[in-house]
Image (cartoon, coloured by chain):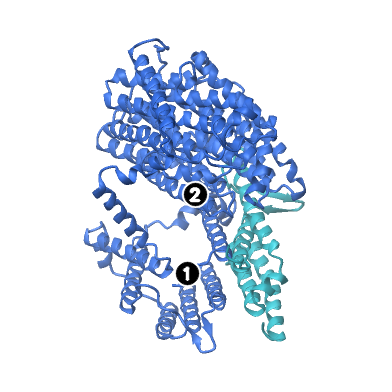
Chain colours: A cyan, B blue
Amino acid sequence: MGSPLLRLTAHLILGVTWVVAWVHILYASVLPGDGFTAGMLLLVAVLLEVVVLGRDRAGAAVPRSLFRGAASAGLALLAVLLVAPLAWGGAPLEHFYIPLGIARLSSTTVFDLAICLAVAGATAEALTAPREPAP
Amino acid sequence: MQLVFLAALVVPWLGAACLAVLPRAWDTRANTLALLFTGAAAVLFSVGLPAGHAPEVVLRLSWVPALGLELTVARDGLADVFGGLAVWIAFGVLLFARCYLPQANAHEGSQRREAAFYALMLAFLGSLLGAVTAGNLLQLYFFWELTGIGSYLLIGYWRHLEAARAGARLTLAITLAGGMTMLVGLVWLGLATGEWSFAALAARPPLTGPFAEGCAALLLAGAIAKSAQFPASNWLPGAMNAPTPVSAFLHSAAVVALGVFLLGRLFPLFHETLVWRWLLRAVGAIGVVGAGFIAVRQVKVKALLAWSTVSMYAFMFIGFSLGTAVGVRAALYAFFVHAFIKAGLFLVAGVGTHLTGKHELDQIGGMARTHRLLAVYGVILGLSLGGVPLTGGFYFKEELLHAAQEEGARVLLVAMLVGEGFSLIYMLRFLHALFVGPGDTGAGKPFPWTMGIPLAVCAALALITGLVPDWMAPVGLEAAVTVVLGYPLDTHPGPALNPMVLTSLAVLVGAWALWLIWTRSRIPIQWWQRLPDRYPLGGRRLAALYTRVADACLALHTGSLRAYLRRIVGLFIALAVIAVVAGAPGVGPLLAAPTSAVDLPTTLALVALLGALAANLAARGAISFALTLTAVGFGLGAVFLALRAPDVALAQVAVEMLATLTIVVALRASGLVTPAGVRLPPGPGDRPALRLALAGGAGLVFGGTSYLAMSASPADSVGEWYARNIEPLTGADDLVVAVLTDFRGLDTLIEVLVFVTAALAAAGLYRREEVPRG
């Protein structure tokens, strides 16, 4: 396990990366970056935690159920986006907008969010899985 | 009516989703929920079941208009028979599982939740219904492989048992291999004919010629693997390590049934090809005799039934191989009757195991004294499968013998008569062992009604189909025959006392006599099991050759990941060399084409990349190797940035950072990193010169392929195409939104699924398996 300064830096990087990932997702249409890069950056931050704290302590600090939940939520969102347009006669994955008062949320943003959750959640689950004793 | 039918297809998936997320506290209600969903699906599916039902498209969605591909859900007689049987058998089997599963889980020491089991069963049912109602070739393939995955997960339900895991892996490997071969045939068929829908293909005249022969061979490989026919039959006995409800449903009326379903779909196009005629006949003849003989020699109850299934499906393959209307009718009749008879027999075996906790024939016995009702069901079902007169099994075999006789197929006739004899012998053995012979009778344990009802229904159907064979016509069998043949069958050969029937009766009497002699001679079953070793099929030389081939194949599995990687890379290099040497079109001109000049930023980025590459090649330690590899990746990102592709550059840098950290974490977890440095022990067959040659070759192949791909860019860029077509094709006012979801969304979705699957597989490997170093 690293020094207190190293641990603090790793935690700070994780926090900042959350914000950067959100920027990638929300501004995917106008700036470089998308849900995939957002997921990759989050994974880098999680791995930094693993390197600094060690696999077991990193897994204890961030509940692994969070990763499974993220991967499941991402895949479920992708399934919804795939079939939802069929309900109004559209093609699978066709874009649509969700009205939010004076603004509207594009299904593309939700698509990027879903990819981020699926990719980051599944890979983080793999990278932080504890080793079980051989049978 | 269409909505009702669609609902029947969707309900199993809804049920699977609900059961997958069922809270642990609700586990005791899992079976009730599963029964509700399955029952609803069964009722909805049965609404409007045909009496002279004409095929109809229930749902049609545009998919790839340029190829004429549509997603269609179609309902016809064939889908009704296969789907209707499957959904009702599923309901009966889940009712059986109500009492069976909790005790079986406890007996096997399984910690798995019942909700997981029922979720998988419902997902499997949804996949099967999707396959039989698929309106086009690729849709069928999608659901076909889903059933394979479902089968793998269900066979491996008791995943703490090595035998269950091994059986699941073997099943997946064989059925997947057959399925991928079939996929090549499906795509070839679609591209060559320009038709992807089954309705359009069935309207074409039968295909002949080299294309038809090749295509038929590829497609039949899928059917043979799925129905566990020779030479792909070994997976079915291994699948018997699954819980009995899985065996009763999947391996009597569902997974193996899909092979016969495919034969029904393909019959109109391919029944006049030589491959169809001779391959199916060969497979069928070997199956009825070989599998029947192997079933006679089994000591485990479910293994006997598994080999019996292989033999019975071989009968159906023979029916289709004849290429005649009578043969088709006989094969479909056989499928219909066999489905509930075999499901019932598996349930009988399951009750025996449930009451005694035993799995072998000589351990269970005398149950007729303690469970008379079970004995009645068992005897009806067993004698029906054995082909005793006035049972459904007798009539389906007579129909097939009659069809073969009409066609003059004497070899098939003899094979089926021998198979018929074997079926009676092993069924008599099964019944005698379970109900008369010595062993654990399960005395004092009740026979639950939830197990009795499905058995009673199966036994009743076995009797009814024997006493009134024509009753199946109005519930869809004739409609199914009409779909396959393309016309109604005018003649209906009913049961009559003719020379063929008399011959069958003589064979049955002879088989019964042989069984009596065997039991009285007290020849132990082990003698029969050693017979193939004493007298191997094809002689001792062939057996020795087979052993040498098997040993050579096993020797390839060194367990060394580096060895596997060397072979994969070597194969890619070999394929590339073959393509260049064979003069693949366009390679020469592209290699000679002038390239454009490189600007200063790109040049600087390339220099940085090459510098990092040189440092990487000179690196000695594993950590410095990983860090210099990262520098190479960053250099590549700089090149992308210089080429004005910031999105790709960002993804490159992010993935590179992730890869470096993953390597560091993996090295630390591997224990290879010591204070003295990193030791990487050499693996088997590891030679520096070979590594250098493979690395150089791989670099040339992948670099050369990239060069060729970029040189062959179309004049019209894809970005310009998107800009022109966004409005007419999608109606979107935002180019990026339309590209990300409407144009590229499906592609991204599939990539993400592949990524997630790989990550989860890696997690599973790391958590549970000891991977040998090397």
Please indicate, yes or no, whether residue B584 appears anywhere in the rendered image.
yes
The N terminus of chain B: image quadrant: top right
- State the residue lying farthest toward the front: B521
- Tell me: B216 left or right of B252: left
Numbered mark located on residue A44 in the image: none
Q: Is residue B761 above or below residue B68?
A: below
Res B43 → quadrant: top right
Residue that mark 1 sits on: B772
Graded by Cα atoms within 10 Å as few (under 14), some (14 to 19) or many (20 or more), the crowding at tag 1 reads few
Q: Which chain hosts label 2?
A: B
Q: Residue at 53% of width from left, 60% of height from top? A: B758
Residue type marked 1 = Pro
The image quadrant of residue B461 is top right
Q: How dense is the environment of label 2, judged by Cα within 10 Å: few (below 14), some, or many (20 and up)? A: many
| x and y, in percent, of residue B585 in the image | 25, 56
Q: Chain of mark 1?
A: B
Kind of element beneath mark 2: helix
Provide the residue designation for mark 2. Answer: B167
Q: Amino acid at mark 2?
A: Gly
If the image is split into quadrants, where does the C terminus of chain B sit?
bottom left
Tag 2 or tag 1, which sits nearer the N-term? 2
